[in-house]
Image: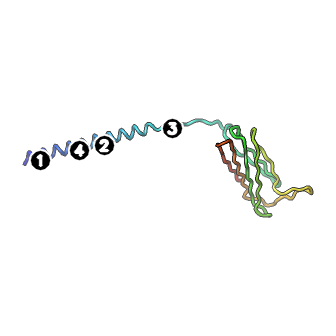
């Protein structure tokens, strides 16, 4: 009986050793798989980042989109609330460099302009395009 217990104990140790080796091999395989992941990082100069800047006064808004050399078209949507209700301005243009647009916050005709008052929730959305490439920039004032 004593001999049978020693054999069982040796078998248990052998099984434990096999499980440890198998587990270690699986762990090494996982590490090998993780090390094959490639991380690419790059530095972008601040002056190369496409950006949208805007400012407004009581009568107009001026917005500029910088560093658009990789795009050839821009579409923009300007929306805001005023005492005269919800307002919106749509536009699009071809690009050949930075894009600046000054827009009247109101309506104009031959007789002059009527400016909207108490302008709030002003939002500009620009969509820059070049074939399959598209970039959306949003600015809230």
Marks 2 and 1 sit apart, C-alpha to C-alpha, by 27 Å
- Of pointers 4 and 1, the one earlier in the residue sequence: 1
Q: In the image as oriented, which residue stretches furthest toward the left?
A: 1
Marks 4 and 1 sit apart, C-alpha to C-alpha, by 16 Å
Q: Relative to 57, does residue 32 appear above or below in the rendering?
A: above
Q: Residue at x 19, y 46 (%)?
A: 12
The quadrant in which residue 42 appears is top right
Relative to 68, is 26 on the left or the right? Answer: left
- Of pointers 2 and 4, the one earlier in the residue sequence: 4
Marks 2 and 4 sit apart, C-alpha to C-alpha, by 10 Å
Q: In the image as oriented, which residue stretches furthest toward the right?
A: 111
- Of pointers 3 and 1, the one earlier in the residue sequence: 1
Q: Residue at x 71, y 49 (%)?
A: 126
Marks 3 and 1 sit apart, C-alpha to C-alpha, by 54 Å
Marks 2 and 3 sit apart, C-alpha to C-alpha, by 28 Å
- Of pointers 2 and 3, the one earlier in the residue sequence: 2
Label 3: element kind: loop
Q: Mark 2 points at which residue?
A: 23
Percent of width and height locating residue 79: 74, 56
Q: Which residue is drawn at 14% across and 46% down?
A: 8
Relative to 85, is 23 on the left or the right? Answer: left
Q: Name the residue under label 4.
A: 16
């Amino acid at each position: 009986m004593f001999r049978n217990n020693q054999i069982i104990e040796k078998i248990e140790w052998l099984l434990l050793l096999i499980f440890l080796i198998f587990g270690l091999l699986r762990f090494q395989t996982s590490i090998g798989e993780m090390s094959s992941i490639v991380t690419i990082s790059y530095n972008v100069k601040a002056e190369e980042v496409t950006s949208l800047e805007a400012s407004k006064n009581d009568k107009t808004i001026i917005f500029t989109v910088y560093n658009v050399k990789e795009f050839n078209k821009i579409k923009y949507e300007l929306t805001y609330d005023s005492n005269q209700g919800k307002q919106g301005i749509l536009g699009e243009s071809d690009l050949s460099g930075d894009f600046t647009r000054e827009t009247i916050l109101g309506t104009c005709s031959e007789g002059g302009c009527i400016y909207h008052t108490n302008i709030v929730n002003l939002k500009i959305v620009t969509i820059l395009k070049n074939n399959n490439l598209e970039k959306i920039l949003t600015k809230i004032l």
